[in-house]
Image: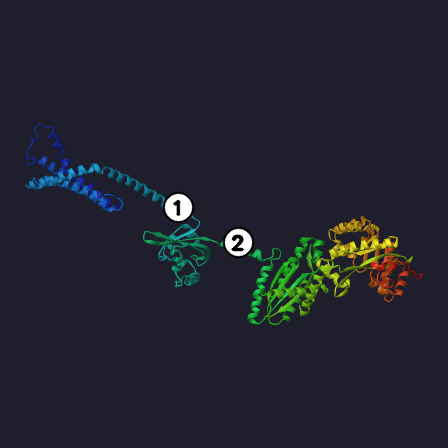
Amino acid sequence: MPHNSVATRRTLTALLILSLVPLLYFAPSLLTRAFSSSYLPHGVCYMWDRQLLGFSVSADAVIFLSYVAIASMLTWIAYRNRREIPFGGMFAAFGAFIVACGLTHLMDIIVLWHPYYWLAVDIKIITAVASAITACLLPPLAPALRSMVKAAAISKKAQAEREQAHAFTRSIIDSSSFSIIVTDRNGTIVSANPASERMLWYTTAELTSNQNIASLIPQQEITARAAELTDDLGQATPPDARALMARAGMGLIDEGDWTFVRKDGSTIPIRLTVSAHSGVSGVEGYIFTAFDITERLRSQEYLRHVATHDALTGLPTRVLFRDRLDVALGRARRYQQAVAVIMIDLDNFKRINDSMGHQAGDEVLVTVAQRLRDAVRVTDTVARMGGDEFVVILSDLREPKVGGQLAQNLLDCLAVPIVVNQQEIVVTASMGICTDTVNADAVSILKNADLALYRSKTNGKNQVYWYTENMKHATIEKLQLETNLRLAIERDELTLHYQPQFSLKTGACTGMEALLRWERKGHGVIMPSEFIPLAEETGLIVPIGNWVLHRACLEAVHLFQQLGKNLTVAVNISPRQFLDKSLLRNIEMALRNSGLAPGSLELEITENILMHDEESLVLLERVRDLGVRVSIDDFGTGFSSMAYITRFSIDRLKIDQSFVRNATTDAGNGAVITAIIAMAHGLGVEVLAEGVETAEQLGFLLQHGCDAAQGYHFSPPVVASEMIQHFSPRKFPTA
């Protein structure tokens, strides 16, 4: 209850007590007289009895004062609640009526000493009229009064609900984990919840002690927002709290990432929402709701790192590498400096995975990555492009030769053995380097470095090759050659030539080797040495090899039918073709479609195929199970083990022509041939010498017991239609 109401109630209580004092004093005598036979008769003046006079005056005084107090209270209530209470004038009328009633009692006191009888009568007449009017008005006003009472009850309930809702809202705000700060229209903080205390390390009292919201935001962020608003709105925005509240003041919800400054000066990243708090008179203040986004930013940074860095080595991946290369090239243009890119490919890395497992391979990659990182400058970038390929950006080079020195450092750092599973592994790498200055772009510099890397790998590995313009021309020619090679089968440009093989014991022709030729239109015959390496590199060797296999079987059957007996036809199988999963199926189809006997087909493989994994050895057994003969081509140039030869019952060893060529002039080569023949015969394996070109070479082979031979001394490779005349036996001198 308001303070004035309490004071009025206390005053009325005091007056009532004071007025009751004479009443209590005269009450015993009055009651005695009332029930006595000697009380005053009707019409006797109060003045004749002092006690009766005192009682009458006291009663009239109490009634008068009470009426005045009641009228004053009604009038005061009507005035204070004039907006909420309907029929406020009715309260004033009732107040006037009650005062009039009180005046009649006041006149009863006055006329005891002064003869104002007419005035007393006038007042009574007025009171009577007011009473009559009131009596007439009350019945019609009864519904309105009931509505007013009901409205008052509803208003009281609504007030209670508002207070409950306010308490509920306050509890939600106080229990929220978000910082909620309320300011006035100038940005001065007027309220803050407990979460704000925990976030900012201020107490609520400190926050609400005339502190502005702008003091919690770094000035540079406020200045940036003010500049942004100035551009958007076309009018200057001061760099203060108004910059924070401008959008919310326009009816927009302003949400963005900001920074809060704590009490100790430390900062915390937040997501801040600013909204206007409106009242009857418009915007009364602003609500700033904030929550900590430290973990979100940390997660975003982690995801960004994962997306741009290799999970195994921690090096930048291709995406981040391209970004840094663009930056480095931009700096080179700006400061007239050079940028070098080094493409790195580990030599024979697959052997490590195959022999020691992928975990060992991963350990090697991690070590290589760390060594590369340690070997370059802080301003340089080492990235992993995938697999065993790395790339290095050397930026801010004063002159290109510095890039060559750094590339050599990279080679040297990899030369130190790596210990994996208590075994030392020496890793070498092929590197291609391209240095460009202001005219470079990312695509061309990467392409050129890759061309240099390719030249490094094809020319011996474990070295650094610089890019030159000649490489580009060679690459263009190579690309054109690859394109035409892909079309060679469709254009029917591939043909087979055959070179006969002779027994050195009987002189009879025992078979022939199918040799591929490419008769490219407009370019003549292209030898295998020019296109077979390209076919191996691009994978074209598989379809080309299958074509050779099927064509050789068909033409061999036709020749053998003309000859009237079955010989053998030897077909070269490349390592890549041998590892193709469709090899067995292609062999079976070639034999079935041509009708060639399995024993008449001889597959020539290189000895390195025997060094492959167990799966390759199983495949070789299955080839032998078909009844097909198997020979090892170019024997003596690889790393085969005689254990493999005995295990798979190899039919024939073919001595490489490099040994045969110098057999009579180089004692070492002659010794190798002699050893191969003796070893093979000891295992029951036939020996054939390739590339026999002179009678002296033939004599050497006859002398040391070689079983068969082929070469230009007997016949050059010829087409199938000319092969029939070369099947006639030969006579050789006796050894």
Does 606 sit left or right of 305 as displayed? Answer: right
- Return the residue at label 1: 171
Q: How far apart are marks 2 and 1 (CA)?
A: 32 Å
User: In the drawing, does residue 299 fall left or right of residue 351?
Assistant: left
Visible residue check, residue 289:
yes
Residue 498 percent location from the top left of the image? 83, 59
* Residue 365 x/y as whole percent: 65, 58
The foreground one among 10 and 148 is: 148
Quarter of the figure with the C terminus: bottom right
Q: Residues within 10 Å of mark 2 (few under 14, many from 20)?
A: few
For residue 694, which quarter of the picture? bottom right
- Quadrant of the rendering where the N terminus is positioned: top left
Residue type at mark 1 is Ser
Query: Which secondary structure, mark 2?
Result: helix
The answer to whether residue 683 of the structure is visible from this angle is no
Q: Considering depth in this image, is 58 or 530 the residue closer to the camera?
A: 530
**92 to 503, vertically: above or below:** above
Query: What residue occupies the far top of the structure in this picture?
Result: 37
| Image vertical order of residue 337 relative to residue 384, above or below | below
Asked which secondary structure carries label 1, the reply is helix
Q: Residue 299 carries which label?
A: 2
In this picture, residue 191 sits left or right of residue 548: left
- Looking at the rendered structure, the kind of residue marked 2 is Ser
Q: On screen, 138 above or below 188? A: above
Residue 604 pos. (x, y %): 80, 56
Residue 459 coordinates in the image, percent (x, y)? 72, 65
| Horizontal side, residue 301 vs residue 107: left or right | right
Mark found first going from the N terminus, 2 or 1: 1
Mark 1, other Cα within 10 Å: few <14 / some 14–19 / many ≥20 = few
Tally of numbered tags: 2
